[in-house]
Amino acid sequence: MSARRITQGTFSFLPDLSDEQIAAQLKYCLGKGWAVNVEHTDDPHPRNTYWEMWGQPMFDLRDPAGAMQEVRACREAFPGHYVRVSAFDASHGVESIRLSFIVNRPDPEPTLRLQRTETRGRSVRYTLATRGAGER
Amino acid sequence: MPVSAESPRASGAPADPGPAPEEHVRVDLREALRASHVEEVLERLDRELVGLVPVKTRIRETAALLLVERVRARLGLAAQTPTLHMCFTGNPGTGKTTVAQRMAEILHRLGYVREGHVVSVTRDDLVGQYIGHTAPRTREVIKRAMGGVLFIDEAYYLYRPENERDYGQEAIEILLQVMENERDDLVVILAGYKERMDRFFTSNPGLRSRIAHHIDFPDYLPDQLLAIARLMLAELNYRFDEGAEAAFVEYIALRMGLEHFANARSIRNALDRARLRQANRLFAAGGTLGRDDLMRIEAEDIRASRVFREGRLDRDGRA
């Protein structure tokens, strides 16, 4: 059962977005004047914030077709990776993320395993470890 | 559920199918024309651009074709997106960029491009400086132009036959690919001088065959240039007085004989300099000024031009 789904970013509790839905979200971002960027990773650990960039962030787009091309190209190159689209808003003087959502998931998805380590005084430290990542 | 890369495009077909196709449906072309608001753009083209009759005719024809295609699609007839890539040839200052902007608007109103913006680029924006720099650069420009019109000015500079390792060829190849495969996403307009453009196409036959519309921009006649000058001045809330207009007619005749004459662009520059001289004249005169004084350009503002002095000097020297 591939019911285990990593829930990171916007829309991650929903069923996967279709390409039209992704394009519509991209159109919304571009309409707001945000720059969009495609990133990918094989390790969905919540502390893994910096994913690999797929090309450069795309500034000054007017139409989602160009960004969709990159999404498709990234998916094709890394079918077994998570791919996400992030939209950056520069109105605060820095490029700050406004929207970020996953557009491709590996099948099956890697799982996160909770490891308990006993330390001094029998207190317990918890660690999350990704399992099943990077095997593809 | 894996996201399928095969799912239908977000918005591919330019014409929405609309109501279910029926065989007995009748379509009023005039009504469709009115609904598309293309007529406004065409009228503005007529009003704002002096002369250019062959260009306007071609654009009207193209608009008619596109409109009919759209109506055909609505009635369920086979409607293939026509090739819309264009080539504008003509001397500098004949209105190629302006017409490209209008064309984008027309295509947008007819639904053949989604956004209707124009991304205007030259060789420098497309071609990189080292190996591997060109492709991402060209693709970035293309992505920016998607949903609109990519206007490549002086496109022949992309191809430099004297240097076989020139990166321009790479940009051309990417363009060719995009012009073929992403016809729904963007329209490419190439522009430049006629002869050089022709030479460019001879060495890149693939490019020529992918461009459906070749539009030639004629040079302006002297009285058209005067009309352009009047339009430009009216836009800026200036006007010629009688002497100035006569002087400007003379100016045009002289300027056309000199080199580097760039049609409407030369006229714009001449007017800019006349405004400069008018401002200086007003300063020198002192006193209070009325609305009319600020609007009026006088003969001396025109006659102070170098064209009069040097043009005359030239002829004296030769005579």
Image: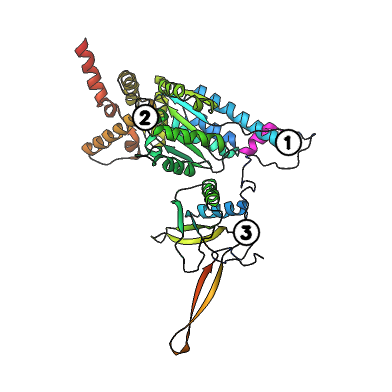
- Whether residue B66 can be seen here: yes
Q: Where is residue B223 in the image (x, y as percent from the top left)?
A: 41, 21
Q: How far apart are marks 3 and 1 (CA)?
A: 33 Å
User: Residue type at mark 3?
Assistant: Asp
Question: Of A90 and A51, which appears nearest the observer?
Answer: A51
User: Residue type at mark 1?
Assistant: Gly
- Whether residue B99 can be seen here: no
Q: Where is residue A58 in the image (x, y as percent from the top left)?
A: 46, 50
Q: Distance between the residues labelled 2 and 1?
A: 46 Å
Q: Are marks 3 and 2 on the same chain?
A: no
User: Residue type at mark 2?
Assistant: Arg
Residue furthest out toward the bottom: A121
Vertical placement of A16 versus B202: above or below? below
Horizontal relation, residue A73 to residue B194: left or right: right
Horizontal relation, residue B75 to residue B185: left or right: right
Disc number at residue B76? 1
Q: What element carries label 1?
A: loop
Q: Position of residue B136 (x, y in %)?
A: 43, 43
Vertical placement of B139 versus B221: above or below? below
How crowded pointer 1 is (Cα within 10 Å; few <14, some 14-19, many 20+) is rated as some
Q: Do labels 3 and 1 share a chain?
A: no
Question: Of B56 and B18, which appears nearest the observer?
Answer: B18
Q: Mark 2 points at which residue?
A: B265
Q: Distance between the residues labelled 3 and 2?
A: 54 Å
Residue B226 belongs to the span the image colors magenta: no
Asked if disc 2 and disc 1 are in contact, CB closer than 8 Å, the reply is no
Question: Magenta part mainly helix, strand or loop?
Answer: helix
How crowded pointer 3 is (Cα within 10 Å; few <14, some 14-19, many 20+) is rated as some
Looking at the figure, which quarter contains the N terminus of chain B?
A: bottom right
Q: Is mark 2 on a helix, strand or loop?
A: helix
The segment highlighted magenta reads B28-36
